[in-house]
Image (tube, helix red, strand yellow):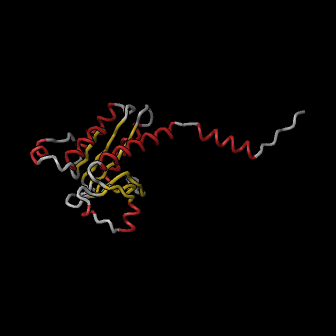
Amino acid sequence: MMKAKRSTGNDVKRERKVRRFVDPQGQKANINGRSLEAEVEATLAQYGVLSVKYSQWGARENIPVSDYKNGLLLKNVPYINYKGTIGRGEFVLARHKYSDVRIEVRSQNVRGTAAEKLPALFENALCFKEETVILVVDGKGFDKADLKWLKDKCKSVKNKTIYMMSLVEFKEWASINLDPNMTSYIRANLTIRK
């Protein structure tokens, strides 16, 4: 009869290490989402937009938005979601002379739960207090029919402006709305499709 081997502390540590390196699809999705968030943040930084966590900005309130010509990018801004609970959104672009813009990003590079992400994203967009919402939806994993559904839903909203755009379209939006070198003529004649 064989005796059962007792596991040592090293065995447990080794097992935890192995589990940590297993990359379930959820971890990959989080990494893709964070990289899209970083792209949005970097795009706005090009135009002098300072990023700051909402909790830090709210606690200090010594960073007036008016000091930053193109505004502040507040991260992890709370809101009440469509379920009535508190959620945290990616960004709010707080601007001195203009209304604030809520920016939410979703990335999907492999087929999966995208069909569930987009309706929740839209329902939350309706709950945001900001009058302008930009939904940056990027990646090859979204079904074209789901993207068309979201775009049509965004167009149908009457009480606020909700844009759905890719990362490339977002960069175009930023250059039009934040670049001081853009003339008023160009701004008046370039439009982002809703």
Would residue 15 be found to the left or right of residue 26 on screen? right
Image position, residue 165 (x, y; %): 28, 40
The residue at 38%/60% (across/down) is 54
148 above or below 178?
above
Residue positioned most to the right: 1
Can you tell which quarter of the image residue 130 is in? bottom left
45 above or below 117?
below
Would residue 56 be found to the left or right of residue 180 on screen? right
Image position, residue 30 (x, y; %): 46, 42
The residue at 18%/50% (across/down) is 180
Q: Is residue 98 visible?
A: yes
Image position, residue 129 (x, y; %): 29, 58
Q: Is residue 153 or residue 179 the one in the foreground?
A: 179
Can you tell which quarter of the image residue 127 is in? bottom left
The residue at 68%/40% (across/down) is 15
Q: Is residue 78 visible?
A: no
